[in-house]
Each structure stands twice: as structure tokens, then as C-alpha cells.
Image (cartoon, helix red, strand yellow):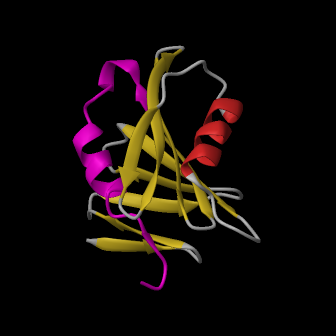
């Protein structure tokens, strides 16, 4: 396993997955180019995110009217949902741990929807705060 480490969090990646930094986010994908995970980080200067605030942010920020389900990814918890738009299958998560809020999406062609779900879940379950 390779470890992707940012200033705020870490994520374990299998060897067949790559990571790249964009201006505002981290991109993670498999070498087969089936789909891509995108992670954006928001760090609160004071106080922590709680479950209610994460849920409210998800409701407000999402461009879709979605049914949100409770989600836990490693040390982070929040909500998740999924939808299909313009032949693209999308999974979204809004999760927090303390003062960090992560917005995570996984997207792939609709015909490949579900193909990487187990691998994506396994990868995201390794999310930890940096320095732990």
C-alpha cells in the first residue's frame, strides 16, 4: 500500500491506484481508468464540525436533491449518496473529523457503475487524520 498524505489527512492507496494534486483538490484513480475519486478539504479555524452541520452543508451544497445516508470513512463520519447524471454514475460523501470537512466524489461512466465500489469503499475506509 502507498500512503497519500496531505497536511490534514492520510489515505492508503493500493499500488494500482494513483494520486495527483489539483489546485483545489486531490484526484485519485485506478490505472484502468474506470473512475476517479476527488477529495476537497475544508479546515475550520475555530470549533469542530458536528453531524448536524455536515448534514446541513450536504443539503445546501449538493446540486442534486438526494437522499443522504449516514456514512463512516475511517476516522471521518457524515453522509453519503449516489445518483446518475448524464450517463455518469456519481457517489458523494460529506464527512468530518474535528475541524476538517471533506467533500468526496467518485464518478465513472454509468455502464461501469458499481464496478469499483468495493475498492473505493476499502480505500476511503483508510481515511485518518494526519500525524496519528
State the image coordinates of residue 71 (x, y, percent, origin top left): 39, 44
Vertical comparison of 18 with 38: above or below: below
In the image, taking residue 64 as reference, residue 45 lies left or right, namely right
**Front one among 35 and 105:** 105
Does the magenta portion include 129?
Answer: yes
The quarter in which the N terminus is drawn is bottom left
Which quarter of the picture shows residue 96? bottom right
Vertical comparison of 49 with 82: above or below: below
In the image, taking residue 15 as reference, residue 82 lies left or right, namely right
Give the residue furthest to the top: 86
Give the residue furthest to the bottom: 131
**Front one among 105 and 54:** 54
The quarter in which the C terminus is drawn is bottom left
Q: Could one spot residue 120 in this view of the protein?
A: yes
Vertical comparison of 63 with 87: above or below: below
Does the magenta portion include 54?
Answer: no
Which quarter of the picture shows residue 18? bottom left
Q: Could one spot residue 89 in this view of the protein?
A: no
**Residue sitting at x 67%, y 40%:** 57
State the image coordinates of residue 121 (x, y, percent, origin top left): 30, 47
In the image, taking residue 109 as reference, residue 120 lies left or right, namely left
**Front one among 82 and 23:** 82
Q: Which residues are magenta?
A: 106-132
**Residue sitting at x 32%, y 73%:** 2
Vertical comparison of 63 with 100: above or below: above
Amino acid at each position: 500500500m502507498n500512503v497519500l498524505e496531505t497536511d490534514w489527512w492520510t489515505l492508503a492507496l493500493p499500488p494500482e491506484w494513483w494520486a495527483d494534486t489539483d489546485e483545489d483538490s486531490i484526484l485519485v484513480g485506478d490505472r484502468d481508468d474506470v473512475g476517479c475519486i476527488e477529495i476537497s478539504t475544508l479546515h475550520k479555524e475555530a470549533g469542530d464540525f458536528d453531524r448536524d452541520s455536515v448534514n446541513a452543508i450536504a443539503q445546501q451544497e449538493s446540486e442534486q436533491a438526494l437522499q443522504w445516508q449516514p456514512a463512516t470513512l475511517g476516522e471521518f463520519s457524515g453522509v453519503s449518496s449516489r445518483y446518475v447524471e448524464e450517463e455518469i454514475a456519481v457517489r458523494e460523501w460529506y464527512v468530518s473529523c474535528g475541524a476538517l470537512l471533506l467533500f468526496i466524489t467518485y464518478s465513472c461512466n454509468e455502464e461501469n457503475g458499481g464496478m469499483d465500489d468495493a475498492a473505493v469503499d476499502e480505500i476511503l475506509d483508510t481515511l485518518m487524520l494526519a500525524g496519528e
